[in-house]
Amino acid sequence: MRRIDAIIIAFCIFVAGGIIYLALQLLGLDSQISGILSQTVLICGLIGWSFTYILRAVNNKMTYNQQREDYEKAFFQQRLDELTPEELECIQTEIE
């Protein structure tokens, strides 16, 4: 993620909090309750995002892990393609 993407996401979350606050006030709630509810919604969203992040980290579904696996597969495939048929046969006999 680039720095500008993080700034845009943070700004959108800030604006979303304001929109929720204004929507609750338009529904007839006073400003204190509207503020508490809008903060509650944003905190629940943050906790939900954190939970999904932790799950991705524990299950190795992060972007870095995926890129590393793709690189390793491509590297070993390239090495396998470079082997001569005799070398490949020798390796197969060693494995068996």
Image: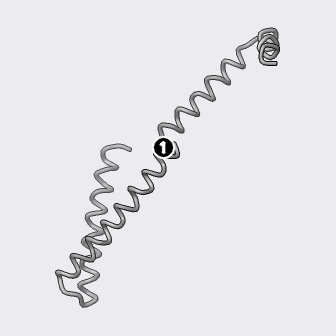
Left or right of residue 41, residue 78 in this image: right
Q: Residue furthest bottom?
A: 28
Residue 49, quarter of picture = bottom left
Considering only vertical position in the picture, is 77 above or below 86?
below
Q: Residue at x 33, y 56 (%)?
A: 9
Percent from the top left, x then y, of residue 36? 23, 76
Between 30 and 91, the one lying in front of the other is 91
Left or right of residue 8, residue 91 in this image: right
Amino acid on which disc 1 is placed: Met
Which residue lies under the disc numbered 1? Answer: 62
Left or right of residue 33, residue 45 in this image: right
Q: Residue at x 38, y 55 (%)?
A: 50
Q: Which quarter shows the C terminus?
A: top right
Q: Circle 1 — which element?
A: loop
Q: Which quarter shows the N terminus?
A: top left
Q: How many marks?
A: 1
Q: Residues within 10 Å of mark 1 (few under 14, many from 20)?
A: some
Residue 74, quarter of picture = top right
Q: Residue at x 30, y 63 (%)?
A: 13
